Amino acid sequence: MIEVRDLTYRYTAGDNPALNGVSISFPAEHIVAVLGESGSGKTTLLKCIGRFLEPTSGRVMLDDVDVRDLPELEFRRRLGLVFQRLFLFPHMTVLENMTLAPVKALDKNRTEAEDAARAMLDRLGIGDLAERYPAQISGGQAQRAAIARGLMLQPEYMLLDEPTSALDAGTTDDFAKWLRELRADTHFIIVTHDILFAQAVATHGVLLVEGCVEARGSLDSIVETARNGA
Amino acid sequence: MKSSVLAAVRTGMACCVVGLACVIGSGAAYGAAEPLRVALTGKYPPFSYYDAQAELAGFDVDVSREVARRLGRDLEIVATEWDGILAGLLAGKYDAIIGSMAVTPERTVKVNFSEPYYRSGAQLFIHRDNPHRIYDIDECRGRKVAAVLGETYQRYLEGNHPDIEVVTLKSSVEIFELLEDKRIAGFVSDRLVGSWQIKSAGRPFVPVGEMLYTEEMAIPVRKEDAELLDGINAALRDMRADGTMRTIHEKYFGLAGERTRQEAAMSGAVIAAKLARGFAVTLSIAAAALALGFLLAVPCGLILNKPHGRMALLYWPVRTIVDFLRGTPVLIQLLFAWMGLGLSPMVAAIGTLGVNSMAYMAEVVRAGLMSVDPGQVLAGRALALSRWQVFRHVIWPQAFRVAIPPLMNSVVALTKDTALVAVISVPEVIREAQAIISVTFEPSKYYFIAAVMFFIVTFPLMKLAGRLEARIRERGYAHD
């Protein structure tokens, strides 16, 4: 379980905090969607959980251990993060993107890593992309390739930032189905402003408004609150 | 009591004698091990030039050999440019100049001259056709008269004939071209050398009028080398007394003058070998400087890319050094490294060109690093890669690919810049070409050949840069 306890983050001292005393728990058994308008603190929350921002106060716990006490490598292996802009490595093929971390960070054998990557791509239905460069694939394909790259480390949790921003409506439905199929091994936390997509993929949700938790619970109740609020 | 004092005195004296013996012994060993380093230009036939075997030869070379032999020292000849030859002596690059240097009051302030070893004089030479009807230096009023840059004739003309427009050129070869085209009225040169050069080059020039003045050629040494000066003077006196000086003089200016010209003519094979060897030196300097420059450019480019944060302390020093190197002529940097820092010509050449190209390549590396999306670092870190792994496998390959085409241009520029090291007497292709030209009198031919040699190397590099640029554009590396 990932737990955020009384988390506050200010980009510059004295300003209004981007996150203001946020406490949320993400139980492992649910796909949780973090909903909110842009500027509500979604991405800041995700960066604090992913240790790319040091919280001004408060703590992030991974299975009851403060993430700051975990060795970097162990933390990164257990918690994956896919950014909104994906950041596939443009000088590498999709296969090379996927094998870089297992080979360099985890010292895996290259051939084994490649076999595992191909198996992963096949399982995700994008096996024909292995030898392509990121510039040669579509936005939806790149989204899947980036998630596949993250899954190569077999993380327990994976944070996705606005995963539908590069997708059109039809692809979004396929993508939601595709994500649900993966949930057996990895627990997704999805940051999105797309309510339809959240409904298609998540069971539980959190609504952020101006850096504070406005509502939490089943996704339907969250959607209700969000609609009323808007 | 008395006897013990005596014993002490005796012991002390023995110590002194042993100490003295040590000093003398080491002094002698030092003298034998140190060769006499003598500078000349190698471009002043028949006093110094490269013969058919591409060996240094000439009147001054023969005198140098005899002097060194009489001093009991090996001879090491340093061929260097005339206009920096005194500065090189003062900087300790060599011990003496045996290069037909005339004694002048200005020079005597800086160095001590030996007794003269030959006398000659300033002579006006004109074109045989004599279009301006000139029979004396006074008839050159309002006309152009040439002299070699840095030679005493330039100063003499400017001081004594202010009505004459003095044209200064790097060598007599260039002066000959101008006079052949009648673009100058004449030139003033040493009477002996001028006559010899005109005959060797088969030029239609003739001496007119009396000698403007006579000069005494002597051997300068540094002021503090009084012992060396005494030795040289003794050697010169010895050479005059036993007829050696006369023999050497006759070898170059006696009746056998025609034969000397034959000796001086270089065969095609020797010329080719000289050019090839010179170009090999050029390429080695370029390669070594490139390796040095690139190795320094990577960390400097990294620092330049991070004006804030952990490397901020290094930013301003590196920024200043890079700007200074880019904003000052590489020629001055070369002369500074050679004379100012006292480095050997090869080390000064490689070091200066390397550091200079570092400045340009560091900017290229910085631009390459800047072109990589900072999000690439985040993605790499999120995948559990260490900072170094992210740099090595994610950032650097992208930055380097972007940097390759401009880096290629730096390589081309560096290769061309090696031509400059000729001025600090590195025996590279330009210097070899100049030595060939001083004997063959064919500047356009050999400068063109040298240019073509450069082009053969730089042209494929330029083409390759263009191709790589196109390929990188196809792959679309620049960020979204």
Image: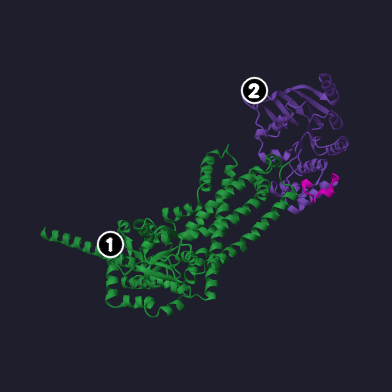
Image quadrant holding the N terminus of chain B, namely bottom left
Using the rendered image of the protein, determine whether residue B163 is visible from the camera's viewpoint.
Answer: yes
Left or right side of B139 for A200: right
Name the spot of residue A163 as percent of width and height, x first. Answer: 80, 35
Label total for image: 2
Does residue B142 sit above or below A146 in this rendering?
Answer: below
Helix, strand or loop under label 1: helix
Write the start and end of the magenta stretch as one range: A123-135
Numbered circle sitting on residue B320: none
The chain that hosts pointer 2 is A
Q: Residue under label 1, please give it.
A: B226
Please, what is the three-letter code of the amino acid marked with disc 1? Ala
The chain that hosts pointer 1 is B
* Residue B98 lies in the magenta-colored region: no
Please, what is the three-letter code of the amino acid marked with disc 2? Asp
* Residue A134 lies in the magenta-colored region: yes
Name the spot of residue A80 as percent of width and height, x first. Answer: 74, 38
Task: Determine crowd level at label 1: few under 14, some 14-19, many 20+ residues with C-alpha closer than 10 A.
Answer: few
Asked whether the beta carbons under mark 1 and mark 2 sit within 8 Å of each other, the answer is no
Name the spot of residue B211 as percent of width and height, x first. Answer: 34, 67
> Closer to the camera: disc 1 or disc 2?
1
Does residue A176 sit above or below B396 in this rendering?
Answer: above
Name the spot of residue B215 as percent of width and height, x first. Answer: 32, 65
Chain B, hue in figure: green
Q: Residue under label 2, please give it.
A: A15
Image quadrant holding the C terminus of chain B, namely top right
Left or right side of B430 for B148: left
Task: Determine crowd level at label 2: few under 14, some 14-19, many 20+ residues with C-alpha closer than 10 A.
Answer: few
Left or right side of B3 for B422: right
Q: Quadrant of residue A148?
A: top right
Chain A, hue in figure: purple
Left or right side of A84 for B122: left
